[in-house]
């Protein structure tokens, strides 16, 4: 029996190591791939549906003729905007508050904007994104989907 004890200990140790290795491998293969949650969340984000021209008109509102100084008082900007909302009821609510709630948000945002921040498509996209976030918090119902700058003129005084 004394001659078998080292063999028994070696066999038990080998079996224990094999079971532990198998357990770790099974756990490793069952774990989701890193970044899989992020990829899944990105795929679940709904893309705006392609709307016909008539449907687009029903959910789009405009604000024209915004004239204000930028953060540099030597620059004046004149802009027109088109706002696409998620549904017709949202557009109706938006139209009711646009003159006294939405327009001041736009003017305040432009007043804090430097002239060089509005140069190029990237600058205008950044302004649209900033306005989208600010205006969505002020809407009584629905959601603003997209803001397009339909007319833009910046002039030094």
Image: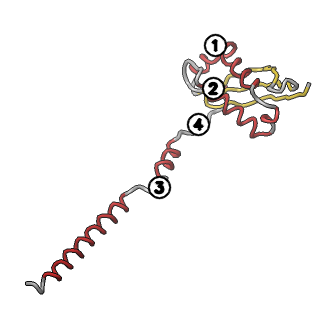
**Residue ID for mark 3:** 34
Q: CA distance from mark 3 to mark 4?
A: 28 Å
Measured from the top left, where is residue 121 in percent x and y? 77, 39
Query: Which numbered marker is on residue 134?
Result: 2
* For marks 3 and 2 on the same chain, the one whose residue lies earlier in the sequence: 3
Which one is nearer the viewer's eye here, 62 or 129? 129
- Residue 111 image-quadrant placement: top right
Pointer 3 and pointer 2: residues touching (CB < 8 Å)? no
- Disc nearest the viewer among 3 and 1: 3
- Disc nearest the viewer among 2 and 4: 2
**Residue ID for mark 1:** 96
* For marks 1 and 4 on the same chain, the one whose residue lies earlier in the sequence: 4
Q: CA distance from mark 1 to mark 4?
A: 24 Å
Measured from the top left, where is residue 116 in percent x and y? 81, 36
Say which element carries label 1: helix
- Report whether 103 appears left or right of 67: left
């Amino acid at each position: 029996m004394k001659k078998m004890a080292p063999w028994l200990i070696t066999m038990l140790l080998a079996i224990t190591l094999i079971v532990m290795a198998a357990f770790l491998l099974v756990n490793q293969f069952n774990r989701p791939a890193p970044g899989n949650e992020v990829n899944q969340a990105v795929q679940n984000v709904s893309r705006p549906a392609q709307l016909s021209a008539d449907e687009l008109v029903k959910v789009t509102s405009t604000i024209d003729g915004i004239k204000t100084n930028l953060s540099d008082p030597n620059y004046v900007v004149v802009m027109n905007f088109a706002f696409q909302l998620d549904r017709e009821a949202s557009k109706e609510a938006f139209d009711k508050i646009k003159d006294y709630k939405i327009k001041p948000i736009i003017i305040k945002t432009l007043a804090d904007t430097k002239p060089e921040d509005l140069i190029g498509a990237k600058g205008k996209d950044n302004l649209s994104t900033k306005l989208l976030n600010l205006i969505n918090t002020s809407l009584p119902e629905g959601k603003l989907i997209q803001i397009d700058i339909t007319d833009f003129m910046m002039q030094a005084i």
